Amino acid sequence: MVCFILGLVVSATYAARPASLDAEHLATLSSRGLLSSWADGALVPYLAGLLLMVVGVVLARWRRPGLAARVLARAGASSPEALLTRIEAAVAALDLQGPTEVASQRISELVEGEMTEFVEHGPALTERLGMLAYSELIGDFAVAERSLARAWSALIDGAHEEVPLSVERARAALGRVRTQLESAQSPPGGGPASA
Amino acid sequence: MKGEAAPNAPGAYREVTLAAMLLGVGQGMLMTAAFTYIGLKLGFGITGSSIAAILGFALLRGVGRGVLKVRGAGSILETNINQTVASGVNTASSGVVFTLPALIMLGHEYSVWVVLLAATAGSFMGVILIIPLRKQMVEVERLRFPSGVAVATILRTPGAGIKKGALLGIGFGAALLITLLGQLGVFPEDIPIGPWLASAFDVAPEGALSLSLLGTTFYLSMANIGAGMLSGKGGIPFALGGILAWWLVGPIAVGAGFTAPGLAGDELVSSVYGQLIRPTGIGMLIGGALAGVVVSLPALRGALRSLSAAARASRVEGGSSEELSPRLLGVGLAASVLALVFVTWVATRGQAMHPLQVLGAALVGALWIALAGLIVAQATGATDISPLSGLALIAVTLMLAVTSGNVVLAVTIGVAVCIATGQCADMMTDLKTGHLIGAVPKRQQLSQLVVAWVGPGIAIGTTLLLWQAGPGGTGGFGPDSVACVEKTADCLPAPQAAVLKGLIEGVVSGTAPVDKYLSGAGIGAALAAFPVGGLGVLVGLAMYLPFSITLSYGFGCVVSIVLERRKGRRFTADKTVPIAAGFIVGEALTALGYTLVKMLGGGG
């Protein structure tokens, strides 16, 4: 990180350096002249700074695997699987026949609580599943979020026929998220989970 | 994601209705005309989402449900479609106000119809290009889109409970009071913290320390602070970008003698900002956005793949996808690009350009629209600030370079770019709102696409009318107009367009800082490779904007982080979000109301 920031400061300072320190000469330069004149005075320190930044990027990416999961574990966060189980149970337990306020309150708590917490596992899940698989998984999770939000809106608007449809869609989407999480844990051939 | 069927048959729960669409178009047209006038007067654009959401509730729910007794009228989702349409129409006003007046003031001959075609093509392109990125920005990257959250908070008010409603009201009231006091001149808009310190400790007006102190002012904008509060830790890189620029790069540059000798005080600050930091920031924005696309390719591929899969599945299973079909988007995009090629051909007819050169110029314009749209959507998503005018300036510079100085074509494409980027930011913000309240993305996308042609005509028409309102049917705005020279109340200085006019004159005489753009782009690319999403665009944007904005935004971020650490996540959802949303909406409505009252009273 220090390497990256140092490189950023150096390269940004020299990127900002005027092509010529003589204002009158600067005013006479064409676009090409600006570039060559800037390169004469600033290219070497600029490139040195850029190199430091690249080293910083490589180091950050090298140290990154497992970092996100470790940070969450230190913060005492539940695992994505445990959170998903809680979310699925809460969706299944929603009482849609009861008072509107109770159901809408529970949906609000779920979306702003456990579901937000699940999303915070994004970097750790990306490391575990890869970007492509993660974007598929989070796409299904987003369908569940949006469906629950729709159920909440329908409850408030009194569109009662919409509520069970939306909750069912959320449930189905969460099921797909579980399938993807489980298939990512099981190595090909059905051996023991490795995650 | 497998093929998703849309939630329900249209009609079961009111979402897209004729009333919502027509009301949205009507509101949008009125706001376009009003915001075009305000843009020419004051130089800034206004987004109409929150205004449309509140008016939509009043008319659709209050009149529709309450007076006309239409069952279920003014539902949360219907009001959302109304605000999507209204803001989709009025977003064209900023795009036109920042660009077209420059062409008019320069006095070149141009065809209004060609400008209108370019603007309309840009409007459609903006919506079409950004739709495939919804999954990436809203679902994968989870960008905050503070204005989108604020509008969702308004829309959810009927069911959010009395406490959240009261907090929204408190935020609104605080913003109203502070904005009003600021407008009345009770205290300055920028609180000069650094200059006070410099004065208290008798710091000499030249040198590195002076620069870092004099450059440190605090923008007392409740909307800006609210946006920072909604962004939380996600906005910290943006705030750090400002610190990098003003407490490290700027002072080191001054210490190394990169500024003209003898500069001191405000002159030193504006020289460092205008000639060193800002152009480097523009380069970083471009490099950061380009490299960001490369870094996000796997996720983008996943998003596009799921779009195609959903479209395929809905065809096979006979259901309805949640997203507009890639085929429809492709056809729309091709038509828009063809329109741009036609615009380029018409504008270069007398210039003896090779047909391939004409095609190349049109494609460069289209590519820039795509890249600029991506930059604006990312910047809006992370910070709520969109560098529309800066990207239009680059578009004009770029087009001047590829068309050997054809000013008319350059500004015409600039109009298209500015409108397109505005549409990108607005569409994505609306889709974020929709995500939070459970709207079907496809319905929002289609609603905005259907009305994308309305705004450009109104904004261009209003601009031309105001120009013809001058003495003798010409010269109705600009710093050289009779009203502005004589400093009468009807002066419309067109500040952004005047800057563009100056830039065009500068580029034609060969003084664009291409060295800063290129070297900044390299840094933006390296930042984008760092494993923190969107870092290149965020730091670039922080260098492009005045420090006062990044500082107060960063203050909002820090407040939100501290509150969450001390009080927990629930506190953020229950207390911080409604208050911050109130700040954003309160300032927007107060500033607009105050401006209109002032103008109607002849005090403008």
Image (cartoon, coloured by chain):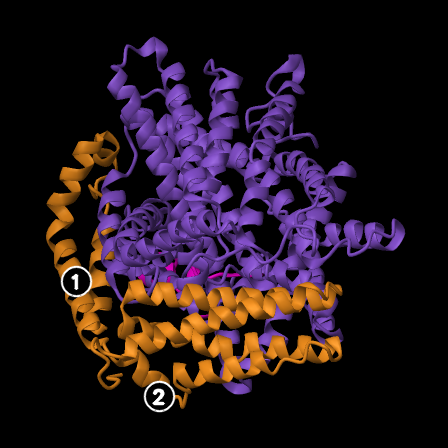
Chain colours: A orange, B purple
Q: Is residue B490 above or below residue B523?
A: above
Give amino acid for label 1.
Val
The answer to which of marks 2 and 1 sits earlier in the sequence is 1
Q: Amino acid at mark 2?
A: Ala
Q: Which residue lies under the disc numbered 2?
A: A73
Crowdedness near tag 2: few (<14), some (14–19) or many (≥20) residues, C-alpha within 10 Å? few
- Identify the magenta region: B199-220
Say left or right for A62 vs B516: left
| Residue B566 relative to residue A46: left or right | right
At which x and y percent is residue B305?
Answer: 34, 53
> Within the magenta stretch, is there residue B200?
yes
Q: Which residue is mark 1?
A: A54
**Total count of labels:** 2
Looking at this rendering, what residue extends furthest in the front direction?
B317
Tell me which residue sits at (40%, 81%) in the image: A80
Q: Position of residue A21 (x, y in %)?
A: 21, 44
Pinpoint residue B480: horizontal percent, then vertical percent: 55, 24
Query: Which of the two residues, B81 or B475, is positioned nearer the viewer here?
Result: B81
Q: Quadrant of residue A149?
A: bottom right
Mark 2 and mark 1 on one chain: yes
Separation of residues labelled 2 and 1 (CA atoms): 29 Å
- SS label for mark 1: helix
Which chain does the residue under circle 2 lie in? A
Chain for disc number 1: A
